[in-house]
Image: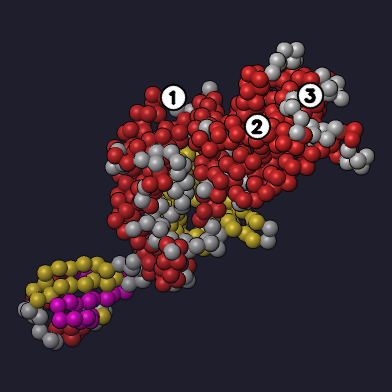
Amino acid sequence: MLEVLRAEALVKRFDAVTAVDGVSFGVRRGEIFGFLGPNGAGKTTTINLLTGLARPTSGSMFLEGREYTGRPKQAQGLMGIVPDESNLYEELDGFVNLTFCAALYGIGKAERQQRAKRLLEQFGLSEAGKRPFKAYSKGMKRKLTIAAGIIHEPKILFLDEPTTGIDVASARQIRALIGGLNRYGTTVFLTTHYIEEAERLCHRIAFIVGGRLVRIGSLEELMTEHQRETVLELAVEEAGPGLAEALRGRFPSYAVHRPDERHLRVVADSTIELLPLLGALAEDGAVVTEAKLLRPTLEEVFVRVTGIEAAAMKQEREGKKK
Amino acid sequence: MSSWTAFRAIVTKDMKTYYLKPPNISWGLVFPFAWMLMFYLRSRTPLDIRALLPGVVSMSILFGTTSMLAVTITFERRSRSFERLLLAPIDLSLLMLAKTGGAILFGVLNAFVPVAVAAFAVDLSGIGWLSVIGSILLIAASSTFLGLFISVAVHEVFEAQTFSNFFRFPMLFLCGLFIPLTSLPVFLQPLSFLLPLTYGADILKAAINGDGILPLWVSFPVLLVFGVGLFLFSLHNIKRKWVL
């Protein structure tokens, strides 16, 4: 898969503080690439470097295979940027905000009006389009800011903490919008400190802590890498009290637990052979209604890799909301 | 071509959003009258409108541009909408020309209010209009670029206002409009020649009443240098301070 964006050994120092420390990664065409890390990890600084709001101390950046380090204006026309705070013009209405943003990218009058109208419809803001931006709710503001970020049809859309500080319903709508945009071909670079958001939306995720990328991979790769054992959970009915013990006797290499009356958990160092296990359960008179492989959650993987407790991340995001 | 679409959009947006708002228009109309009244009350002599015209025109421009631009840019930086402009694929020089273009235009329009009013009250024949128009444009540009310089130096809107006054008021009293340069204390006179308004006001005095003290071939280039210098210095500061 071709890379739309590439960062090579990016470093950003502010006096004695190194905010971004040798970060390298590529964003593939058509994917949602997530940057996951706590506040102060270097997520926004990385976006600022990539979009030209900050100059790297060292390192290189490429868009569509062409280097633009030190020449961000050459690349900005191909980027859409949605900052962590909605930054459109409070006095202007939704429609004018969108047409103004399109004009900044040199789009002609008729075309920008057509695109603004279409986006307002697509984002469910047609009626709000005539109201000033200051009269919008936070969720509506964020939606219009995303619309403004894509009105010039960029090759890559940067979304910095798109659902921070907005209500649950709006956050769901925005996640659905991001997913929809991606399905229609928009490549997305997303920073977030919501682990579940990264898990739901991103094709590949990079963990950033203290300005360094500590791990990068697809959800599948990250999970598999950190799956130390195979855990199979079975929903069972009509099972006697000695079922777990009986199974342990038959399969000494498996650890078998009974977390509650209706569930049985089988843990093994390697793979679990399903057919002999189901056969043994049937012989013991148990009816298996469901079997699922339990995988570590992204949160567990993140904690293992970064050493940062998920609770600390949660506390931070609650703080940021306020 | 696409950069000019952006340029036009920024100037139009700023004119509509900031400069052509009723409070600003009324300010542009009320301000010259207030100054004329002040001079009338102070001198208690029949008002010599033509003699006052260079001063009122200069002040209308200075007050209409410097703090207006400093405040609007500081406001946009606080609300982060200015970031949107920095992230657009427009050359920084052209972007800042677009941002200052609205204020320059507003300053020029402000300058013509007292001229238009004076035209009904006194005979304006014999005025060197080419010099008047040229100086109005250059005073508007250099005052606006002074506002740009101020906006790069401050973080808050109130600081922009305060810092503007720090430049404007000394400039008013040292530029020779109300106190002739030759009547100023000797130690202040060199300071007057470090102020752009001194040259702009002198051109206006020469063009309207024929009582300027500097030749036009000195005042025009010096004013131009002030304008270009302030713009380039501000641009350098923007690159240094806003693109980290």
Circle 1 marks a residue in which chain?
A: A
Q: Position of residue A247 (x, y in %)?
A: 17, 81
Question: What amino acid type is highlighted by mark number 3?
Answer: Lys
Q: Quadrant of residue A249?
A: bottom left
Q: Residue furthest right?
A: B186
Query: Is residue A109 covered in magenta?
Result: no
Q: Residue at x 37, y 47 (%)?
A: A136
The magenta span reads A256-274
Residue denoted by label 1: A108
Q: CA distance from mark 1 to mark 3?
A: 45 Å
Q: Are marks 1 and 3 on the same chain?
A: no
As rendered, which of B8 and A157 lies closer to the eye? B8
Q: Nearer the viewer, mark 1 or mark 3?
A: 3
Residue denoted by label 3: B205
Residue denoted by label 2: B32
Res A252 visible: yes
Residue A104 vertical position relative to residue A280 in the rendered view, above or below: above
Q: Residue at x 73, y 41 (%)?
A: B168
Question: What amino acid type is highlighted by mark number 1?
Answer: Gly
Mark 3 or 2, nearer chain start: 2
Q: Position of residue A102 (x, y in %)?
A: 44, 32
Q: CA distance from mark 3 to mark 2?
A: 17 Å
Q: Nearer the viewer, mark 1 or mark 2?
A: 2
Query: Is residue A261 covered in magenta?
Result: yes
Q: CA distance from mark 1 to mark 2?
A: 40 Å
Q: Position of residue A5 (x, y in %)?
A: 48, 43
